[in-house]
Image: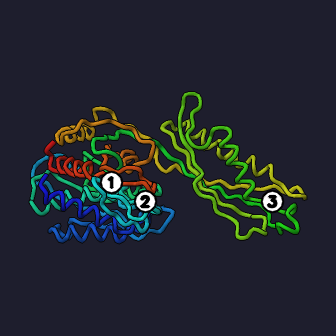
Amino acid sequence: MSTSFIKNAESLVMGLLATAGISGREGDVVQFISRRLRQAGAPADAIHIDRPPPSSPIQGETGNLVLRLPGTQPGKRRLLLAHVDTVPLCHGARPIRRGRYIVPADKRTGLGADDRAGAAVLLWVALEMLRHKLPHPPLCFLWTVQEEIGLYGARYARLGLLGRPQLAFNFDGGAADKVTIGATGGYRMQIHIRGVASHAGVGPEKGVSAVTVAALAIAQLHREGWHGRIEKGGRQGTSNVGVIRGGEATNVVTPEVEVRAEARSHDPAFRRKIVHAIEQAFRQAAGEVRNVAGVRGRVRIEGALDYESFRLSNDEPCVTVAEAAVRRCDAQPVRAVSDGGLDANWLTARGIPTVSLGCGQENGHTVSERLDLAEFRRACRIALCLATGGE
């Protein structure tokens, strides 16, 4: 890879990292990408910006961005995809280079390399194809939105708009030699706790504290091994209570609290057991907390499957083609199964088997996040190899 190629790729990823775009507010990122595609000569009818995903819990500024290129040589249509949204921790990130890494200048923010690095890999490859008129089979590039809040971009991507690809490659987290062939399934829950308000100084005994209900339930889950990493009877999964909202004053017994939680497992039946344990803990806690008149707390629980687990077979064509590309780029593929959800979960479920490859991201969703530039460059080479059919 020439020096100019490296500079172009690094310039793109720095620009994308510096562009704000948490889930639902990806408009500036989508415009950044589409503007550069047009500048490189992409035909207007080859670029499509879709409507925001339906059924998303947030309205959203924009939908997925798609670039479709007809093949200049025969072959199966290939799809390269990455998501453009980041978690809220990355809002306001200012990327700087330190040695072989890109890191956030502000130690209070994440970087957003998950998954702006993947978005940059796709953009760099697309620009190379357009500017240098490289030969390639039929291609589709897909930049998805709202991945971090439930894979909504992939879940509602219009398959007809993608040209029904037969080989699909998702660029997301990890080292460039990581070939992820499966991922866990995830279930999200909203738990509404209703108590009774009262004056916390004059008559606390008249109140039913929704905060106490939440605290008792979470403590029980922790004590009984149903929170965090879960291992029971040879089966594994995870759960997390990630959001607690409620209360406005210290002198009021809190009457309402909203809790948001999740459960994950590669084993759907065990995931359902985790969900049941969470529901049971909150209902039991609500029954235990009562006021002087005997009034108890109440809970209402809503939940939905975000994405189902999947595992590709070892000889799935997208897997063997991806591994050949990794080898072509002087690395040995390392197969992996993810404990997090990926856009590949929904695309695979919708009939497009999708393998995932890394771009050099490390420590995602934390203030220690960084991007390994050597791995990022290798990911660019692998993606170009896949796009041109040169593996």
Picture quadrant of residue 114: bottom left
- Residue drawn at (39%, 37%) of the image: 311
Can residue 159 be seen here? no
Q: Specify whether 228 is left or right of 364.
A: right
Label 3 residue SS: loop
Q: Residues within 10 Å of mark 3 (few under 14, many from 20)?
A: many
* Residue type at numbered disc 2: Gly
Q: Which residue is mark 3?
A: 208
Q: Specify whether 384 is left or right of 197.
A: left
Residue 144 vertical placement versus 350 (above, below)? below
Q: Which residue is mark 1?
A: 371
Q: Specify whether 217 is left or right of 170.
A: right
Dot 2 and dot 3 residues touching (CB under 8 Å)? no
Label 2 residue SS: loop
Nearer the observer, 199 or 131: 199
Sequence-first tag of 1 and 2: 2
> Residue 117 at x, y = what percent?
31, 56
- Residue drawn at (87%, 63%) of the image: 206
Q: CA distance from mark 3 to mark 1?
A: 48 Å
Q: Which residue is mark 2?
A: 110
Picture quadrant of residue 254: bottom right
Q: CA distance from mark 2 to mark 3?
A: 39 Å
* Residue type at numbered disc 3: Val
Label 1 residue SS: strand
- Residue drawn at (47%, 63%) of the image: 108
Q: CA distance from mark 1 to mark 2?
A: 11 Å
Nearer the observer, 361 or 40: 361
Q: Residue furthest front?
A: 99
Can residue 121 be seen here? yes
> Residue 313 at x, y = what percent?
33, 33
* Residue type at numbered disc 1: Leu
Q: Residue furthest right?
A: 293
